[in-house]
Amino acid sequence: MAETPSFAFDPARFFDGGARGHGGALGIGYHAHGEDWAELTLPYDARLIGDVATGVIASGPILTLMDMATSVSIWLKLGSFRPQATLDLRVDYLRPATPGRTVIGRGECYRITRSIAFIRGVAHDGDAADPLAHVAGTYMFLDAPE
């Protein structure tokens, strides 16, 4: 029988004090979540522009958003935090983000094995039916399974 974690992972609380590190520097924040998915936001910021002529956000901050959203989805599916490393994160960019709009990244964890978590996700800037990017990947747990 699996042990119940001593605390449930709460992404709203996790981001409540403001994300730290790289995600915090980019302004990434909490939006919504479910049992195996999380949505995070990347507000438009002139510091993140990749092409000054168009005002489009660079691809790097969007990749970071999706890496964080999919990581959080794993902790939600597990019910607690577990250290992990991104093994593979494929990003298919479909179009540039619309200047001035917040990007929303939704990550979903659809399978967990003893040592690997499988994820997928989508980024959009207001219309999930018109995505900016799709992601798919795997994460490896860094601790030994119990």
Image (cartoon, helix red, strand yellow):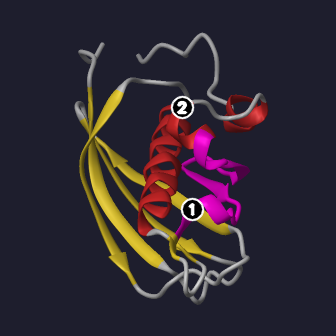
Numbered circle sitting on residue 21? 2
Residue at image coords 43%, 18%: 2
The residue most toward the front is 53
The residue stretch that appears in magenta: 25-49
In this orientation, which residue lies closer to the viewer: 47 or 1?
47
41 left or right of 21? right
Q: Residues within 10 Å of mark 2 (few under 14, many from 20)?
A: few
User: Label 1's element?
Assistant: helix
85 left or right of 10? left
In this rendering, the answer to whether 126 lies above or below 39 is below
Numbered circle sitting on residue 48? 1
Front disc: 1 or 2: 1
Identify the image quadrant of residue 42: bottom right
Q: Earlier in the sequence, mark 1 or mark 2?
A: 2
Residue at image coords 41%, 16%: 1
In this rendering, the answer to whether 146 lies above or below 129 is above
Residue at image coords 53%, 25%: 80
**Amino acid type shown at disc 2:** Gly
